[in-house]
Structures are given as structure tokens and as C-alpha cells.
Amino acid sequence: MASYKFLSQVHLILITILIIVTLLTPITTNTSPQPWNILSRNDFAGKLTTASSSVESAAIDFGHVTKIFPSAVLNPSSVEDITDLIKLSYDSQSSFPLAARGHGHSHRGQASAKDGVVVNMRSMVNRDRGIKVSRTGLYVDVDAAWLWIEVLNKTLELGLTPVSWTDYLYLTVGGTLSNGGISGQTFRYGPQIANVLEMDVITGKGEIATCSKDINSDLFFAVLGGLGQFGILTRARIKLEVAPKRAKWLRFLYIDFSEFTRDQERLISKTDGVDFLEGSVMVDHGPPDNWRSTYYPPSDHLRIASMVKRHRVIYCLEVVKYYDETSQYTVNEEMEELSESLNYVRGFMYEKDVTYMDFLNRVRTGELNLKSKGQWDVPHPWLNLFVPKSQISKFDDGVFKGIILRNNITTGPVLVYPMNRNKWNDRMSAAIPEEDVFYAVGFLRSAGFDNWEAYDQENMEILKFCEDGNMGVIQYLPYHSSQEGWVRHFGPRWDIFVKRKYKYDPKMILSPGQNIFQ
């Protein structure tokens, strides 16, 4: 620990020296040429706008807890439009910041560019091109502006599918690959960033590079999980497999956390077991009111609510086994054997049999329901964490059964499920715990515009509990208000992150909304 603190101090000194050197040069940031001064250039005519509606739309995101205004929005029709704008900023004596924005699903202004330019990546989507599937190579080349649901629809036409997903499919390929991309398949197939074969990237110097683990490998691994700091991703080549037809979907309720986690950890250790595994928490805050309540038959809602009331906190384990014509006769027997091996509360098992598409797109129904009630475009003060396996019981006692129960305000799904570290790659930028198994914990909160600060305060209380307990918890989809927070976030890998920043974006042009390099 002492050596780590010493290294952190050295890193901060090096950063300070670099900042001083930068300040001594004639380069400044966020000053002229301002984006509106280049509206008259022919190469941006009709594409770069300062219209209040466009700027206002780019200032907010899914989180609805920040409003950060750019000076302009670029609606590119080609990769060259983005390259030209980055070069203009980089080659100028005074540069301006830029941020790529996909579907706007960040929750804390991470895709913002204060007084700079937000690049609306979705404007490049062309229905006649952008997704090319290779049957022989078992991969799909996809422009980064496309949504994962669009990729899935295209690959399924040829009976193929990516293997690693997020729970919500209406996110852009570039957005999830800049963060990680996790869900219940991660324990088996790794995050989405571990399933990329090749990428095209525009660096902060305006240089276009094709990269893979063999070509420009440092840039390749930097961009994956790199929070947009090293380049704007424009194309990704994603691994595919033959798509299954259906999903056998089982849910089990637990009252004992140690049995709940023990069963999860045993299941993810099997190489030929389930294809999907997630866990969630149900807390005594009244009847189920989030989209997951639709997973249970209405006739059982009162029975489940009574169990929650009696035990205050219960847990749900979800597992899925994919199948097709070749395995349809054995899947029931496999899932029956699995059920018998689990330590759930007998009488609280729920089963569904759905198409592969319906399972992957399961959150869409809840989204449409919330939109119909006007409850989708509301504040989402989310908190997502990676918790080491050795600390998850302490987290349960202190957070699920402590802070959450005590404050009695949490609404929305609370997820908790394990993943295997060996499915990740340490060369990538994404920060994860050191233990072989760690848990993803997600507080996917919905709040009102008049009370979201209370949820945010609870987030701070949870983070403080983890920090005070030296639990080694790391944020996923991270937000830190200071560079010191980012130094702690990346730990001993902070110096690599900094070196890559100065190598690929030396003028600190890209993704200022992450608040890493001020």
C-alpha cells in the first residue's frame, strides 16, 4: 500500500510537470477559433449547426441530472467530416473540445463538450450500408453509430449473432465499446470489448487508423473501454456465432445471500452450463414497481411481496439456456437438473420459454411502458460498481441491508451478478478489480426532477462506505469529480492511461465530459 501511494504521488507530480510544460507553450484551450467561426467553411456547410434546438438536445442525456451546452453540433455524413473537424481543432493554435455522442444514454454528461462541438454520430447512419456480415469469417463489420438492436436484426437474417450483449439494446456500438459492454453473458463470453476483432479510429490528431490486436495494437487496446479519450471509433468488427432459436429462462428466489452468491459462483465456473446469468435484489419498499415485476405471474405478486415484507431483502437469480432444433429435446432435462442443484426457496421458481430475439430485447417492453406513462425521460442517478468477490458479503450487509433499507428511497432494478476476470484483457483501458471473480452491482434508479439529489447523496454514501472499508470497489460507467478520483480509479495503470492520452490526443481535445483531464 505504501508503494502504491508513493507511485500515485509520482504520477501526480509527472502530470503537474506536463501541465506546466503545456501552459508554457503558446497553446491554450477552449478559445478561438470557436466552432461558430467555421460555419462558413464549405466543407461543413449544412452540417455544423448552432441552432438552439440542436444545442439543447446535445446538452442533456439519459441521466437528466446535468445540462452541459456545446457551442455547436456536427451532423456528419461521412468519416471525413469528423476527421476534418478534429484536424481543424488540432492544427489550430487554439483548439476546441469535441465529444462523440451516440444515442445519448450516458448519465452524467460524459458525452458532452462544454463550449465545444458535440458530434452526432447517429447522423451517419445510412440504411443502405454500414453493416456487413461475413458468413465465412463469422464476423460483422458495423459502423459505430449503429444500435446493437440494428446489428442483431441484420445478423439474424443470416442466422448469426454476436455473443456478448448489454441488457438494453438501443445503445450504439461505439458507445458500449468505449465503456465495456456487460450483461449476463459476460461471465462466459467476456464483455463486448473482448469480442472485437478490428476497429477504425480517428485519433485526437485527426489521423485515421485501422487497428487490431496485431496492427496498431496499443491504440486498439487503448480505445476499448477508453471512455473516448484516445479516439473516435467509426467502425468495429465483431465476432459472431451461429444464433440459437429460443431461450429457456428461469428465475429463482432466495432469502439467504450466501446461498445466492454461492450458487451464482458455482454456475459461472462451468464451461458448458448456462448461457446467461444475472442476479437482482428486491427490497422492502412496497410492491414491485419496476419492469422486472412483469417477470412474475400477477397471481404470485402478493406472495412475493409477503416474502419481501417478512425478510426485508430477498434475491432473484436469473439463468438462461439457449437452444435450437438440435438441443430442444435435452434442454428441459438440463434445466431440471440445474434447478435441483440450487438452494433457492422451494416453490419460488418461474419459467418462461421465449424466442432468442425476445429474450435479448426484453427491456424494450419496459421502456415502452415507462414512456407511455411519461416515466422514461426522467432523472436517472445511476451507480454501477465492480465489487471483488471477497467483499460482496460485506457489501450486502452494509449496503443492501444497511444503507438501502435505512434510506428507503431506492426505485428501479438493483442488479448483482458475478463475472470471471479471465474473460477480460488487462491491455484494455477498462478498470476492473484484481480478484479472479468480481460482481457487477447496478443501482438503476429512476427519480423525479425534484428529488434526484437524494438518490445522488445515497450514491455518495455507498461509495464512502466502500472507500472507508478499503473494499477495492471500482466504478463502471465511472464518474469522478477530480483527477485524484481518476488516479484512484485506474490505480497502478494510471500512468499507462496518461501516456496513451498524450500519445493519441496530446491537446486534450476528445471527450472532455468525462472530466479526466481538466
Image: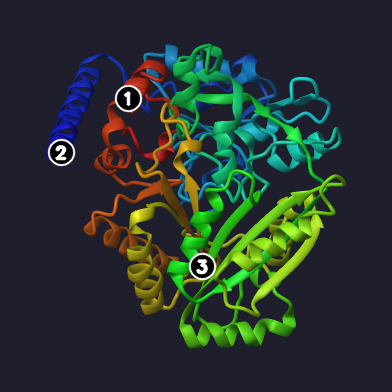
- Residue 452 falls in which quadrant of the image? bottom left
Of circles 1 and 3, the one toward us is 1
Residue at mark 3: 447
Residue at mark 1: 496
**In the picture, which quadrant includes the N terminus?**
top left
Neighbourhood count class around disc 1 (C-alpha, 10 Å): few under 14, some 14–19, many 20 upward: few
Give me the C-alpha separation between circle 3 and circle 2: 38 Å
* Nearer to us in this view, 415 or 447: 415
* Amino acid type assigned to the residue bearing label 1 in the image: Ile
Residue at mark 2: 5
* Nearer to us in this view, 323 or 54: 323
Neighbourhood count class around disc 3 (C-alpha, 10 Å): few under 14, some 14–19, many 20 upward: many
* Amino acid type assigned to the residue bearing label 3 in the image: Ala
**In the picture, which quadrant includes the C terminus?**
top left
Of circles 3 and 2, the one toward us is 2
Q: Secondary structure at mark 1?
A: helix
Q: Relative to 401, does residue 123 appear above or below in the rendering? A: above
